[in-house]
């Protein structure tokens, strides 16, 4: 009888030890003789900010000092995470995230959790979130287009690393603009005294791409199939007759894909009016070079002067995105 009781007690003790070990601080076994990983914690970001200038993911503007603002807390974001044991594999793809007003952190929504342990994991986040199937890949689809008035077709992204400890300490991430922004401001010359209504704009050239993709982890661009193509967009711009002392203006604001930072040939800007007028002007390839690149997160402001017979580019300025306040450099080229 005594040996039987002893055996039962030992079995119960061993079973209890096994349960304790399995639940010990949430530790997860990785196999016999393999090192265990520490407790997993859910992903959460203390702050998410956006750059108003600079290359995607760079964390700094060309001047070296980032200008940032908090991401609107009503914005939804998308999270990705690579497998820390097999970085080529995306473990979590396009998990929807939002700002949690309860603990003031940006995190995946309740049914889209992402778990991080003590291994360094590489993650990416973009905004605004898109649930389309094409966004399930780490290659986010890009489309050149007019910049929407509400900014909904702008795309911001960042790559970062995290561990359970860094999440507990508080992670801060800054998103950068993925597109390049070209703003064409149309003005009249002194001899053009009639109103002009523009209803179509076209931009073409070997370095202009209407579609492509952005790799969230490699932070590189790829052209779409069959690219490059001419970008054609409907506009509704009225360029009034000149007034003194400053001519009235009209603006076309474009988001473009920076596949090539240095142009290989001139681009061509064309505009069409409701009255059937068609005018065009070359954008010299010298506008964008290795020293003055066609870069993500930068805004290039073109002043385009219209006359009855032609249009000319009179000025190109490089600004931080959206600010339009501090001109970092004026691009000069032969007209």
Image: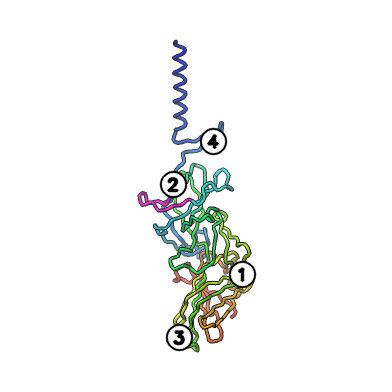
- Mark 1 secondary-structure assignment: loop
In the rendered image, the residue lying farthest to the front is 275
Q: Which of 157 and 113 is in front in this view?
A: 113
| Numbered label attached to residue 242 | 3
Q: Which residue is label 4 attached to?
A: 30
For marks 2 and 3, give the CA distance: 58 Å
Label 1 vs 3, first from the N-terminus: 3
Label 4 vs 1, first from the N-terminus: 4
The picture quadrant where one finds residue 281 is bottom right
Q: Is residue 20 above or below residue 55?
A: above
| Numbered label attached to residue 126 | none
| Numbered label attached to residue 263 | 1
For marks 4 and 1, give the CA distance: 51 Å
Q: Which residue is label 2 attached to?
A: 111
In the rendered image, the residue lying farthest to the left is 102
- Queried whether the magenta region covers residue 224, the answer comes back as no
- Mark 4 secondary-structure assignment: loop
> What's the magenta region?
95-107
Which SS type dominates the magenta stretch?
A: strand
Label 2 vs 1, first from the N-terminus: 2
Q: Which of marks 2 and 4 is in front?
A: 2
Label 2 vs 3, first from the N-terminus: 2
Q: Residue at x 59, y 80 (%)?
A: 335
- Mark 2 secondary-structure assignment: helix
For marks 4 and 3, give the CA distance: 74 Å
On the rendered structure, is 79 left or right of 104?
A: right
Q: Which of 167 and 15 is in front in this view?
A: 15
For marks 2 and 1, give the CA distance: 45 Å
Q: In this view, does 315 lie above or below 142?
A: below
For marks 1 and 3, give the CA distance: 34 Å
């Amino acid at each position: 009888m005594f040996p039987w009781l002893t055996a039962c007690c030992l079995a119960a003790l061993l079973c209890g030890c096994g349960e304790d070990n399995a639940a010990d601080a949430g530790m997860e076994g990785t196999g016999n003789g393999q090192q265990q990983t520490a407790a997993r914690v859910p992903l959460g970001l203390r702050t998410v900010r956006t750059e108003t200038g600079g290359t995607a993911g760079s964390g700094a503007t060309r001047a070296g000092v980032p200008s940032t603002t908090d991401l609107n807390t009503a914005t939804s974001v998308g999270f990705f995470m690579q497998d820390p044991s097999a970085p080529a594999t995306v473990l979590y793809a396009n998990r929807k995230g939002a700002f949690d007003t309860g603990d003031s952190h940006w995190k995946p929504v309740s049914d889209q959790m992402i778990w991080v342990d003590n291994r360094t994991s590489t993650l990416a986040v973009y905004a605004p979130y898109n649930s389309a199937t094409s966004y399930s890949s780490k290659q986010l689809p890009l489309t050149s287009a007019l910049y929407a008035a509400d900014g909904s077709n702008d795309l911001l992204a960042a790559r970062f690393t995290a561990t359970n400890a860094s999440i507990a300490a508080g992670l801060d991430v800054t998103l950068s603009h993925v597109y390049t922004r070209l703003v064409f401001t149309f003005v009249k010359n002194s001899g053009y005294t009639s109103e002009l209504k523009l209803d179509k704009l076209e931009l073409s050239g070997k370095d202009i791409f209407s579609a492509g993709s952005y790799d969230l982890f490699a932070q590189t661009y790829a052209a779409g199939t069959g690219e490059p193509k001419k970008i054609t967009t409907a506009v509704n711009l009225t360029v009034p007759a000149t007034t003194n002392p400053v001519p009235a203006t009209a603006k076309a604001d474009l988001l473009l894909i920076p596949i090539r930072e240095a142009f290989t040939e001139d681009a061509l800007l064309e505009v069409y009016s409701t009255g059937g007028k068609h005018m065009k002007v070359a954008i010299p390839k010298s506008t964008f070079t290795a020293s003055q690149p066609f870069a993500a997160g930068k805004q290039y402001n073109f002043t385009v002067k219209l006359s009855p017979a032609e249009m000319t580019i009179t000025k190109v300025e490089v600004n931080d995105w959206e600010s339009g306040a501090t001109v970092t450099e004026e691009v000069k080229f032969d007209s």
